[in-house]
Amino acid sequence: MIIALALLVAIVALALLTFSASKKAKVDGNLINIETTDAVLADIPNSQQEGSVWAASLEKSNPDAMFNSGSKAYAGHDYLLAIKSWSAVLALPNLSAAFQAEVLLNRGAAYASLGQNDEAIKDWTQTIKMPGTPADLVAKALINRGFANNESGKTVKAMDDWTSVVNMKDAPPTDVTKALFNRSLLRYKLKQPVAAVADWSQIISITDAPAEFVAKASVNRGDSYREAGKLQEALADYSRAIDLKGSPPVIIAEALINSGKVQILSQNSIAAAAAWARVVEMRDTLPEQKADAMLNRGILFYQIGIDDQTAAKEQAQLFRSALQDWIGVITLPQAPLALVADAQFNLGVLHSTTGEIDVAITNFTFAIATPDVPAKISAKALVNRGLLFQKEGKTKEAMADFNRVLKLPDVPEEYSEKAKKFLSDGKKQ
């Protein structure tokens, strides 16, 4: 039993020292960090005239009104009607090259919204190749075609499209920024981190780049620096994203979360706690961000509390703060289930530390029973619950938990090895 208790403490320390990881790169998404935002499809431009219903517009053969009809349909997610309206416009004679390009650009967006990438690519290719197409529309068509090519698995063509925008002499800075950002995501996905960092650095250096993309590039580059062990450079990039005027709240929150994790690596607990506290207090952030911040701040409070130099009164307060944070995660509406399960696990650790074994077992059980719980959380909860069962003399239940660890798919080796050892020790007794 003494050996089992010592191992329990070791496992608890190992689990709680692992703060939640930063997000990894994705080439398709709608949020933050290394995910793209609205660089996918060109915005539908405003018509110069008030629109009317499509049928009346067609009778009058009024290109502007017909175009506006398509814009209204697109805004209402009626993509088939939008395509019908814009196709009717394109059938009219004597349209200027610029207007044709605008219509083709947007009809391509409607096709893409229906998942008809081949048709979308045809429209955008025509926009790009048509003589007289304004540079800004060429850039937008290239950005969109690159995204459609990437969606279709044509990564080389996608890279070429975005690179073409970057190399244009007269492309608007906003479009160059979006092309660089999409290219950086693809490069990161293709395991070209140096090239991705170069793209993020170029975005940061563009004078008129949109603040949102400068902030995202800063967070992404900061994450790359963190992974490379360049902690001061990472903190500088996170600070840029946090302090940048016009930086969206969700990006500021992500920068604060990751900054806190770097501060932990730099052994600056006060700065880490302050960063996570800002996220918890912010408005307009994502539930997963608040949950992430509370989960990690609770871990920090717990770790400081178990320090040998912490007085009993201080430890009790730190443990209460940790408990409040983890309960905050569990009760937070729309908190990701993986973070909820991790909070339950951490509560189990806390209660086992304070000698509340039955409560700890209940917490571990909740963590294990959480739907779609990651294998790592399930495994460490099973190992710890098994050890507590051993402490209470419930050998059968303990052995069952250790065996369950070995049956988990994709279980981390550290936990499968511990489960095997505890099973072996149990058979020797």
Image (cartoon, rainbow, N blue to C red):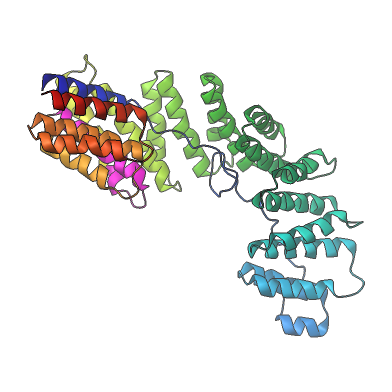
In the figure, 149 relative to 177: above or below? below
Query: Can residue 360 be seen from the camera position used here?
Result: no
Query: Can residue 122 be seen from the camera position used here?
Result: yes
Quadrant assignment for the N terminus: top left
- 101 horizontally vs 382: left or right: right
Look at 31% across and 30% down and name the residue there.
416
- Residue in the foreground of this view, choosing between 231 and 240: 231
Main structural element of the magenta stretch: helix, strand or loop? helix
- Residue in the foreground of this view, choosing between 360 and 300: 360
Query: Where is residue 224 drawn, in percent x and y?
Result: 56, 28
Query: Where is residue 206 drawn, in percent x and y?
Result: 72, 35
Query: Where is residue 123 drawn, in percent x and y?
Result: 78, 61
The single residue placed furthest to the top in the displayed view is 309
Look at 31% across and 44% down and name the residue there.
340
Quadrant assignment for the C terminus: top left
In the figure, 338 relative to 273: above or below? below
| Magenta-colored span | 328-354
Look at 23% across and 36% down and name the residue there.
403
In the figure, 96 relative to 192: above or below? below
- Looking at the image, how many numbered discs can be counted on the residues? 0
- Residue in the foreground of this view, choosing between 276 and 404: 404
Residue 45, quarter of picture: bottom right
Residue 348 painted magenta = yes
Residue 123 painted magenta = no
- 227 horizontally vs 361: left or right: right
The single residue placed furthest to the front in the displayed view is 428
Residue 426, quarter of picture: top left
Query: Where is residue 341 drawn, in percent x and y?
Result: 30, 42
